[in-house]
């Protein structure tokens, strides 16, 4: 009998996975992008606040689905149980080839870019150090799920402390004149500005469902998953909103909208920290992005593990290490592919065209709640309040990203979607045929 993964992780690890994955390198530049879309400081702050609040329905739907199907695999599991193995497989197929290993390589390189600021190094050295980082985290999460969970909790706590220092210190130097200034010339105003800003925040909140990929290893999922998803959502909203209040309060809007590193530029204006702002921000970036790298290596391989257990992926990916109780083949495969991608230039830009397909899986997941609720054997341990309204809001907020991504690159996005279907369906039917042959023996 094959070995199975066991429940060893608690609430804080689940929260750390969601927070650690969501708060990554993006926040270091996204504030200026949202400011550019919003046009004024107050609209930028409101955009982050409302943008986070409207993401809560997504977390409520995830919490219900996670307690209905308390197993590893995330989106793949929810779509499969809705009755569509082919769609579930295609989502997982696209994730493995176009999202998971590339995400690890991108985040590893981003981490080393901050290290290189403190310790200058050439391009090849950056790639080598990035590969070494991937190997270090791979080894950690390969050898122990409890140790990996504790590390993730500690590094996520360190992230929160760093942002708390910026927020706590920066609030004393916020200028009311900056936060109350009218919109910059040519920027949208009123509701149009708010909607534009909210749309621009969507990417900053992506990643909160990370803990759902490890539900099968979470203790007492009935209590833990709703608390983790709702709690992490509130914590992230609080951090983003207060951080935006500080940044917009100590930087003029015309400077903020042009800044490529708004947090770094804002920190320069905070006494004491400002004297060593470059070092502080670089050190913060290392911790923040390394946390995202760790969580990606920890949770992502659980998707392919779940697919392999269903006979819809390479059999070896479903193996659990006899000593360490981790899906070691799945973890190693993702990391080795990620290391290869680190040394292949421009491949990640090409794979970015698959983002449209990957975002559609989120929308599809929220839509499955209508199918699940009609099933007689559907018995979630926790139910979302006003679930129909929450599901509609979750689908709507997810579609914001889908539409914006489609507008960014419509033809490449459609081609990528076609590539997933053309390559994935033959593989799916091949594996299903093998499963049928095994059952008939």
Image (tube, grey):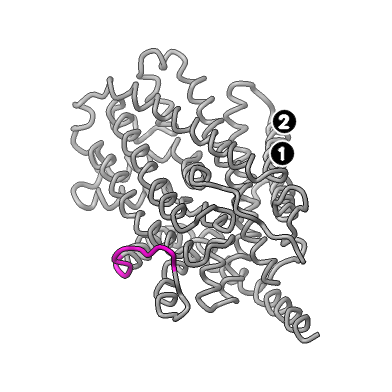
In which quadrant of the rendered image does the C terminus lie? bottom right
Q: Residue furthest front?
A: 220
Which residues make up the magenta segment?
380-389
Q: In the figure, 377 relative to 200: above or below?
A: below
Task: Look at the numbered discs 2 and 1 and tell me whether their residues touch, using CB distance below 8 Å.
Answer: no
Instruction: Please say whether residue 339 is one of the residues in the magenta stretch.
Output: no
User: Closer to the camera, 374 or 23?
Assistant: 374
Q: Which of marks 2 and 1 is nearer the N terminus?
A: 2
Q: Quadrant of residue 131?
A: top right
Residue 111 in the image: state x and y as whole percent: 59, 34
Residue assigned mark 2: 125
Instruction: Please say whether residue 385 is one of the residues in the magenta stretch.
Output: yes
Q: How many numbered circles does the render carry?
A: 2
- Regarding mark 2 in the picture, which secondary structure is present there? helix
Residue assigned mark 1: 131
User: Closer to the camera, 80 or 63?
Assistant: 63
Residue 83 in the image: state x and y as whole percent: 53, 79
Q: How crowded is mark 1: few (under 14 residues within 10 Å), some or many (20 or more)?
A: many
- Horizontally, residue 3 falls left or right of residue 214, namely right
In which quadrant of the rendered image does the N terminus lie? bottom right
Q: Residue furthest bottom?
A: 440
Q: Residue furthest right?
A: 441
Mark yes or no: residue 113 visible: yes
Residue 266 in the image: state x and y as whole percent: 37, 25
Q: Residues within 10 Å of mark 2 (few under 14, many from 20)?
A: few
Q: In the figure, 129 relative to 171: above or below?
A: below
User: At x 52% / y 20%, what residue is drawn?
Assistant: 279
User: At x 70% / y 66%, what residue is drawn?
Assistant: 308
């Amino acid at each position: 009998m094959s070995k199975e993964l066991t429940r060893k992780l608690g609430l804080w690890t689940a929260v750390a996975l969601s927070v650690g994955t969501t708060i990554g390198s993006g926040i270091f530049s996204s504030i200026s992008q949202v400011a550019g879309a919003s046009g004024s400081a107050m609209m930028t702050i409101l955009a982050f606040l409302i943008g986070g609040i409207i993401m809560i329905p997504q977390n409520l739907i995830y919490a219900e689905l996670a307690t209905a199907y308390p197993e590893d695999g995330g989106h793949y599991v929810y779509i499969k149980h809705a009755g569509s193995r082919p769609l579930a497989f295609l989502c997982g197929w696209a994730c493995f080839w176009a999202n998971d290993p590339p995400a690890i390589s991108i985040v590893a390189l981003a981490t080393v870019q901050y290290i290189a600021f403190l310790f200058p190094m050439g391009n090849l050295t950056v790639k080598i150090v990035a590969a070494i980082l991937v190997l270090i985290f791979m080894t950690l999460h390969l050898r122990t799920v409890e140790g990996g969970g504790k590390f993730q909790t500690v590094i996520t706590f360190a992230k929160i402390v760093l942002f708390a220092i910026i927020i706590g210190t920066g609030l004393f130097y916020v200028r009311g004149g900056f936060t109350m200034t009218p919109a910059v010339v040519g920027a949208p105003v009123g509701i149009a500005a708010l909607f534009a800003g909210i749309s621009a925040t969507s990417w900053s909140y992506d990643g909160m469902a990370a803990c759902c990929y490890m539900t099968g290893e979470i203790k007492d999922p009935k209590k833990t998953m709703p608390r983790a998803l709702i709690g992490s959502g509130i914590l992230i909203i609080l951090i983003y909103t207060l951080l935006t209040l500080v940044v917009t309060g100590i930087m003029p809007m015309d400077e903020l909208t042009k800044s490529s590193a708004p947090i770094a530029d804002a920190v320069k204006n905070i006494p004491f920290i400002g004297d060593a702002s470059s070092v502080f921000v670089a050190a913060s970036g290392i911790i923040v992005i390394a946390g995202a790298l760790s969580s990606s290596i920890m949770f992502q391989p659980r998707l392919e593990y779940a697919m392999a257990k269903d006979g819809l992926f390479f059999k070896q990916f479903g193996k659990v290490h006899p000593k360490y109780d981790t899906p070691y083949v799945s973890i190693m495969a993702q990391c080795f592919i990620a290391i290869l991608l680190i040394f292949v230039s421009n491949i990640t830009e090409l794979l970015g065209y698959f983002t449209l397909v990957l975002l559609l899986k989120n929308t599809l997941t929220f839509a499955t709640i209508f199918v699940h609720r009609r099933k007689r054997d559907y018995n979630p341990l926790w139910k979302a309040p006003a679930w129909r309204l929450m599901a509609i809001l979750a689908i709507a907020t997810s579609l914001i990203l889908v539409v914006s991504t489609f507008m960014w690159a419509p033809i490449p996005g459609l081609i990528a979607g076609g590539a997933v279907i053309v390559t994935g369906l033959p593989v799916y039917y091949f594996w299903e045929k093998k499963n049928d042959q095994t059952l008939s023996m």
